[in-house]
């Protein structure tokens, strides 16, 4: 079955920028004008055919807001407690060369390979594809670590049984140590194998960006009363059309503020080189000018979090096998038990069908919940959450991913790279704030906006001109909107982006 939209469907993705003749009744036309003898029945109220058109509110559900007075936010995230490394193992020489830590961090990513944490007399689990064994560190020469297996001379003898090879992607995990009687401790030894294991952390930063919008109407137009009774999400009502336009501008700006926190990316130093005379704004005429950019939610998860994807054109995370793989990944990370899922409509319905299939009475679509269906009650075919293993998932439809004028339209155009949902851990994280100089507990997601004792740039609105309170000799009303903020995504390793 196919759904064909109407030929004159009101699906224009964005508001018209100019005033059109089609917005007004023409009383001079012979077919609808004063020449006709019958007065038309004018329906004054504007029909709200799209319901609530705003998409903001997501960040208010999952995060918090906090003021800042600096040009950037810098925070540090703790490293793992236990020592684990990945490298190559030459089986007939027992030499293990460290390449990275267990998260794939290498030199330049806040991880120095020589500080791998493997020390003399450490007992380790050593594993590669299909096998594992226990060994002990007997020599540490920077990245080259000699690990001999217990009970055998070389790893080629056990567990390879005579095979000699150089094995990449060998995993080594320290489980303890094994010293002789009366021997010195590590503090009394010398060399690379006697280093203390010091905690590591990775610092991240983000910068706020300045967002602006603007609305203007002449004094003459502001004094005109129209015949259409307007209303809007911003609470405006009446017969003055400029109230509608001003309210829509404010509502649209609120949405822009949230969408930038979700979608924005940091600008690359090589991007957006502006040549002289290429833009309307002279400030952009100097070559080398780049936009500031900021790290939004999707960019943070892509860079530091987890991704799950299904087959092209098929929803991700819609069967238990996919969810079990997600749980396995979460187990490797912070293992946050409660997670909120914000998904598009197709993924939400696919999850409902998946959960319904677990019910032996639901094969025919007649029993989707823990209740008895009868002819006198409504049939509930949806789920708001479920538990798998030790994890609780709470599902919610996200309008932003469905609306054709926002990410919903982008998903339709880019099906192979569509964002179908996001999983966000509930609760708070503990991080070290370098501005405050102490550990702070904050939600994993929170918005930082510029503010001081005398100036708050969280959401500024000011009006100038001669309409209402006169502030200048301009015969117009100018409404200005400004916000300076950024989104902080802490512990992105606990997030999952569904594509």
Image (tube, rainbow, N blue to C red):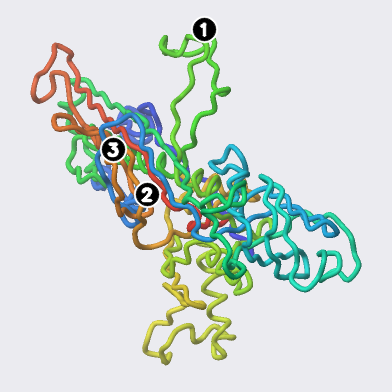
User: 10 Å neighbourhood of mark 1: few (<14), some, or many (≥20)?
Assistant: few
Q: Is residue 324 above or below residue 70?
A: below
User: 10 Å neighbourhood of mark 3: few (<14), some, or many (≥20)?
Assistant: many
| Residue 21 in view | yes
Of badges 3 and 1, nearer the viewer stands 3
In the image, taking residue 481 as reference, residue 352 lies left or right, namely right
Mark before the other along the chain sequence, 3 or 1: 1
Find residue 55 and name its label: 2
Judged from the image, the secondary structure of the residue bearing numbered disc 3 is: strand
Mark before the other along the chain sequence, 2 or 1: 2
Q: Residue furthest left?
A: 469
User: 10 Å neighbourhood of mark 2: few (<14), some, or many (≥20)?
Assistant: many
Q: Which residue was labeled with disc 3?
A: 449
Q: Which residue was labeled with disc 1?
A: 276
Which residue corresponds to the image point at 28% horizontal and 37% vertical from the top-left? 449
Q: Is residue 455 above or below residue 175?
A: above
Measure the C-alpha gap from mark 2 to mark 1. Answer: 37 Å
Judged from the image, the secondary structure of the residue bearing numbered disc 1 is: loop
Q: Residue furthest right?
A: 162
Image coordinates of residue 171 in percent, x first then y, are 69, 60
């Amino acid at each position: 079955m196919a759904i064909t939209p109407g030929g004159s469907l009101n699906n224009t993705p964005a508001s018209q920028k100019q005033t059109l003749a089609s917005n007004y009744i023409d009383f001079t036309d012979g077919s609808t004008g004063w020449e006709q003898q019958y007065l038309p029945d004018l329906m004054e109220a504007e029909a709200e055919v799209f319901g609530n058109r705003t998409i903001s509110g997501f960040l208010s559900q999952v995060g918090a807001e906090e003021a800042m007075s600096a040009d950037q936010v810098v925070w540090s995230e703790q490293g793992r407690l236990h020592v684990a490394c990945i490298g190559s193992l030459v089986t007939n020489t027992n030499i293990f060369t460290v390449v990275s830590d267990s998260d794939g961090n290498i030199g330049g990513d806040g991880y120095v390979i020589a500080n791998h944490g493997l020390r003399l007399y450490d007992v380790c689990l050593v594993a590669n594809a299909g096998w594992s064994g226990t060994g002990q560190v007997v020599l540490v020469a920077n990245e080259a670590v000699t690990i001999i297996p217990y009970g055998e001379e070389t790893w080629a003898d056990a567990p390879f049984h005579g095979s000699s090879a150089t094995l990449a992607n060998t995993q080594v995990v320290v489980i303890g140590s094994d010293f002789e009687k009366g021997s010195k401790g590590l503090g009394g030894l010398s060399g690379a194998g006697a280093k203390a294991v010091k905690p590591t952390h990775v610092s991240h930063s983000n910068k706020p960006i300045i967002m602006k919008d603007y609305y203007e109407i002449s004094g003459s137009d502001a004094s005109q009363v129209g015949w259409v009774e307007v209303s809007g999400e911003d609470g405006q009502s009446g017969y003055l059309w400029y109230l509608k336009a001003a309210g829509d501008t404010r509502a649209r700006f609120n949405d822009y503020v949230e969408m930038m926190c979700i979608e924005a990316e940091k600008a690359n130093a090589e991007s957006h080189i502006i040549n002289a005379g290429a833009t309307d704004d002279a400030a952009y005429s100097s070559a080398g000018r780049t936009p500031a950019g900021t790290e939004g939610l999707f960019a943070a998860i892509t860079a530091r979090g987890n991704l799950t994807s299904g087959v092209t054109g098929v929803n991700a995370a819609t069967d238990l096998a996919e969810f079990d793989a997600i749980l396995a990944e979460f187990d490797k990370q912070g293992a946050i038990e409660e997670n909120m899922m914000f998904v598009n409509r197709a993924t939400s319905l696919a999850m409902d069908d998946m959960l319904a299939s677990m019910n032996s009475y639901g094969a025919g679509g007649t029993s989707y919940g823990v209740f008895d269906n009868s002819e006198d009650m409504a049939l509930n075919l949806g789920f708001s959450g479920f538990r798998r293993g030790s994890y609780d998932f709470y599902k919610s439809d996200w309008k932003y991913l469905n609306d054709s004028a926002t990410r919903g339209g982008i998903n339709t155009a880019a099906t192979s790279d569509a964002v179908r949902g996001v999983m966000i851990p509930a609760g708070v994280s503990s991080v070290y704030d370098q501005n405050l100089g102490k550990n702070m507990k904050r939600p994993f997601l929170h918005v930082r906006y510029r503010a001081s004792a005398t100036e708050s740039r969280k959401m500024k609105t000011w009006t100038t001109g001669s309409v209402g309170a006169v502030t200048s000799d301009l015969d117009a009303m100018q409404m200005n909107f400004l916000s300076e903020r950024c989104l902080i995504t802490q512990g992105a390793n606990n997030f999952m982006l569904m594509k």
